[in-house]
Image (cartoon, helix red, strand yellow):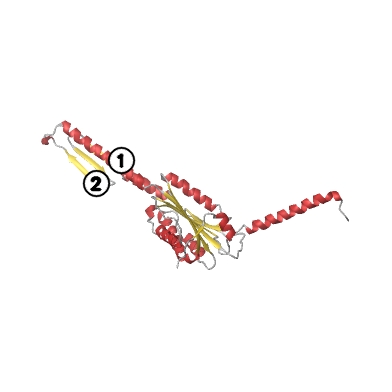
Amino acid sequence: MELPSSSYPLARKSMALVLILVLIVLLSHNAAAASGGAMGGGFSSARISKASYSTSTRSRYTYSTPYTTYVYRDSCCGSRRTYTLLHQNGMEERDMRVFFIAVLVSGVMITLLLAYFDKNRSMPSVIKLQVALKGQGCSLQQDLNDIALKADTSTQEGYKYVLQESARTLLRNSEYWLLSYLSEQTKCDENQAENLFYELFFEERSKFDEETLVNIDNHQEQKRMSDVSTSSTPFIVVNVILATAGPLKLSPINTATDLKAILQKLGGLAKREILAAHVLWTPQDENDHLSAERVFQDYPLLTEFKDKLD
């Protein structure tokens, strides 16, 4: 039975709608591969350490009367000076007042100088390092999974462990390096550094379709990828986001040799220098694959090396 001619436009519209829905389903299935892992922590322990440091470094001045004992003490420098003035010395009251004022002014100047140098020394930096690797034959995923499952991410010792072990496993897999990106931003104070750190962390974390392994601030969660995708050219992308107590002044990455030097420097940082450290990697699921198209879509700042490691 023929359809009336008036029903043709409606049929064409229905067929077009069906085709569009099929394409959406297919495309969403292909784009679903991006399982992610995240581990690390930061700022809480560092802030406690800083508060105790600030309290312990305050200078203290004590005195009783102009004719007894004056004490000037600066616990930061570990010094204690005691001046005892006696009636028998024959000093006039005016001389003692001048002496006391001189000691007080000197103490204030020392405190201001210490605060100035401490401020300039402790301008924090936020670093973001991205590395893309060839996934086939690379053991990086399993290594990072093991680190995340073992790490205590509630302490600065734990941040150091995450950073050090992640740097080491990246170095062990240097033959698979393909692309990299590095940025370092120095901030005026810790609050600004913390805001930037979590902004970068959220930006990179939101690129995952599913978080399948998390150990952040000792909150742990692990689950299987619900929709695993396959790719003929699998890749792995690792993000290291780090906040340090002072600027590291890292050199730009032009070669694989530059990246090797930077990873060695990050892995060798003392725990007191690390305010926060997060490591993210995708895909986390070893059965999942990340395509080249997805790498260049989500990580457009990655660039090639100008050399290759031997």
Circles 1 and 2: CB distance less than 8 Å? no
| Mark 1 element type | helix
Residue 197 seen in the current view: yes
The residue indicated by pointer 1 is: 112
Where is residue 43 drawn, in percent x and y?
A: 43, 49
Quadrant housing residue 110:
top left
Where is residue 100 drawn, in percent x and y?
A: 21, 36
- Whole-number angstrom distance, CA of label 1 to CA of label 2: 17 Å
Q: Would residue 112 be found to the left or right of residue 67 on screen?
A: right
State the residue at coordinates (44%, 47%). Answer: 193
For label 1, the crowd category at 10 Å Cα-Cα, with few meaning under 14, some 14 to 19 and many 20 or more, is few
The residue indicated by pointer 2 is: 79
Q: Would residue 81 be found to the left or right of residue 58 on screen?
A: left
Amino acid, disc 2? Ser
State the residue at coordinates (16%, 33%). Answer: 95
Residue placed furthest toward the front = 306
